[in-house]
Structures are given as C-alpha cells and as structure tokens.
Image (spheres, rainbow, N blue to C red):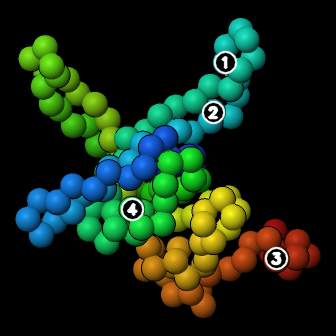
Amino acid sequence: MSINSIIIHGRLTRDPEIKTFGETSLTKISVAVDRAFKSNKENAQTVDFFDVDAFGKTGEFISKYFKKGQEIIVRGKMQLNSGTDKDGKTRVYPAIVCEEAGFAGSKKDNGGGTSANTAASTGIKADELVDVAAIDEDDLPF
C-alpha cells in the first residue's frame, strides 16, 4: 500500500489561471506557505512555494472565489511533472494535484466566503460542517 497525500495552508501568490482543453478545465495557482520556524541568519520567515493544479469543478470553485493574496487550504497529492525548459533541457518539477480546496482566514479576507461555499468544493453537506471555534473544550472526549 502506498500513500500520497498533502495538505497545505497558505496564500495565493497570483490570481488563478484557467486553461481549457476541450471539455476539461485546469486551474493553476501558486501558494506561499510559511515554515513553522525561521531558518536564516536574519531571523526572517522562510516561505515555500507550491504549484497547484485543480481540474474541473474544484478548479472552477477556486477561480470563482479566490484571488491573489487570499488564504486557501488545499488537499491533494504530490506529483512530479516533466517538461522542456527554454534551453531545451528536460526538467522535473513538483506540483500538487488538488482534490479539495477551502477557505481559510477571515470572511473579510476571503470576500465573505461561507461554510456553504467550502462545502460545495469538498462535497460535504453544509449541515455536516462544524464551527470549530464554537466547540467548548469541556465537550471534547480527550
């Protein structure tokens, strides 16, 4: 058995880019994710950048509700793609194939995003979503 799963939470570095191939659509985004630690001498935040490919309805959801600078949570699988650079050399580059995407941050930051919109992107019914901030710690089983 093998597992290939990744979840990232960060900000879009540019507006979503949509490409259409016949009846299939592909939305490409880039997400900047802060590392949990500062790893340089200037004590500045270190950031990783991830290319993300979202197909079909998931990509349409991203292109409709997200823009540069907004926070996003992406769940998907990592894949290595290859291509030829401008010098004719074959290059391998990683990309996340998005399976689910959702809002993060405040509603103001995300253009008034709601739980229902997040549910639409993930296939979860709106009444199944839980407001984590409203949970009383005394109610937790651990």
Q: Which residue is mark 3?
A: 135
Q: Earlier in the sequence, mark 2 or mark 4?
A: 2
Mark 1 highlights which residue? 39
Q: Position of residue 6 (x, y in %)?
A: 45, 49
| CB under 8 Å between discs 3 and 4 | no
Amino acid at circle 1: Ser
Q: Farthest residue toward the bottom?
A: 127
Q: Tell me what residue is drawn at x 49 percent, y 55 percent.
A: 67
> Which amino acid, mark 3?
Ile
Amino acid beneath label 2: Arg
Q: Quadrant of the C terminus?
A: bottom right
- Which residue is at the front of the view, 60 or 131? 60
- Looking at marks 3 and 4 on the same chain, the residue that comes earlier in the sequence is marked by 4
Residue 128, position as x, y percentages in the image: 59, 86
Element marked by disc 2: loop
Q: 99 or 44: nearer the eye?
A: 44
| Location of residue 115 in the rendering, given as x and y in whole percent from the top left corner | 60, 78
Which residue is painted at 49% across and 41% down in the image? Answer: 13
Q: Nearer the observer, disc 2 or disc 4? A: 4
Q: Which residue is mark 4?
A: 63
Decide: few, some or many residues near mark 1? Use Cα within 10 Å; few <14, some 14-19, many ≥20: few
Label pair 2/4, CB-CB below 8 angstroms: no
Dot 4 lies on which element? helix
What distance separates the C-alpha of mark 2 from that of mark 4? 26 Å
Judging from the image, what secondary structure is the residue with disc 1 in? loop
**Residue 130 percent coordinates (x, y):** 68, 80
**Up-down: is 37 above or below 73?**
above
